[in-house]
Image (cartoon, rainbow, N blue to C red):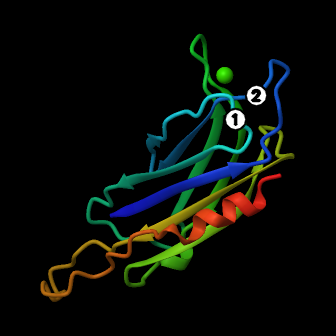
């Protein structure tokens, strides 16, 4: 299981129409999961856990996550705020663990920094192989509240 704890973003620029309604899409191996949208907010806090089934395939050095933040629209398509890609190579070949990803810069569709950043926590539990000890539950680290304060400190 791959768990992505979407904590918060900060310093999202205002749009022409005012404040956006940020919503996060996390994409892993083509599978997309979304948080809820937060109305009218430049420093949104989601604290939402998105879970991806590894389908028995462990992470490798080319594994990555796409993080896309959009402005939710009730009418028409959601507008891109910014996006980033996280390499998961640090999890490759390893046991279960959790790693924080803090202050990731969100880039525009032209690859320019938007000024906004996002904080995440990624927890990896490798698929159970037939050889492993069933009495060892492996990585069951759950993201803690520790990262939350970082969000508040970083928002202006
Ligand atoms: Ca909107």
Q: Please tell me which residue is depicted at 83% across the width and 31% down the height of the picture.
A: 14
Circle 2 SS class: loop
Q: Please tell me which residue is depicted at 55% across the width and 61% down the height of the picture.
A: 64
Residue 26 location, x and y as percent? Answer: 52, 47
Q: Residue furthest top?
A: 75
Query: Where does label 2 land, which residue?
Result: 19
On screen, residue 26 above or below 141: above
Q: Quadrant of ligand 1?
A: top right
Few, some or many C-alpha atoms within 10 Å of disc 1 (few <14, some 14-19, many ≥20)? many
Horizontal placement of 44 versus 32: left or right? right
Mark sitting on residue 41: 1
Q: Please tell me which residue is depicted at 31% across the width and 56% down the height of the picture.
A: 53
Few, some or many C-alpha atoms within 10 Å of disc 2 (few <14, some 14-19, many ≥20)? some
Circle 1 SS class: loop
Q: Please tell me which residue is depicted at 16% across the width and 87% down the height of the picture.
A: 131
Marks 1 & 2, CB-CB < 8 Å contact: yes
On screen, residue 75 above or below 66: above
Q: Quadrant of residue 73?
A: top right
Q: Quadrant of residue 127?
A: bottom left
Q: Quadrant of residue 118?
A: bottom right
| Distance between mark 1 and mark 2 Cα atoms | 6 Å
Label located before the other in sequence (1 or 2): 2
Residue 60 location, x and y as percent? Answer: 46, 72
């Amino acid at each position: 299981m791959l768990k992505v704890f979407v904590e918060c973003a900060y310093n999202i620029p205002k749009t022409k129409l005012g404040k956006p309604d940020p919503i996060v899409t996390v994409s892993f191996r083509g599978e997309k999961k979304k948080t809820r949208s937060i109305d009218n907010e430049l420093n949104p806090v989601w604290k939402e856990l998105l879970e991806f089934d590894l389908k028995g395939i462990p992470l490798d050095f080319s594994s990555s996550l796409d993080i896309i933040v959009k402005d939710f629209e009730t009418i028409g398509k959601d507008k891109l705020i910014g996006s980033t890609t996280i390499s998961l190579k640090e999890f490759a070949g390893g046991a279960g663990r959790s790693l924080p990803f803090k202050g990731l810069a969100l880039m525009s569709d032209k690859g320019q920094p938007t000024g906004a950043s996002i904080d995440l926590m990624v927890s990896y539990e490798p698929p159970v192989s037939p050889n492993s000890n069933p009495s060892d539950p492996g990585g069951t680290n759950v993201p803690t509240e520790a990262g939350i304060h970082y969000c508040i400190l970083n928002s202006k």
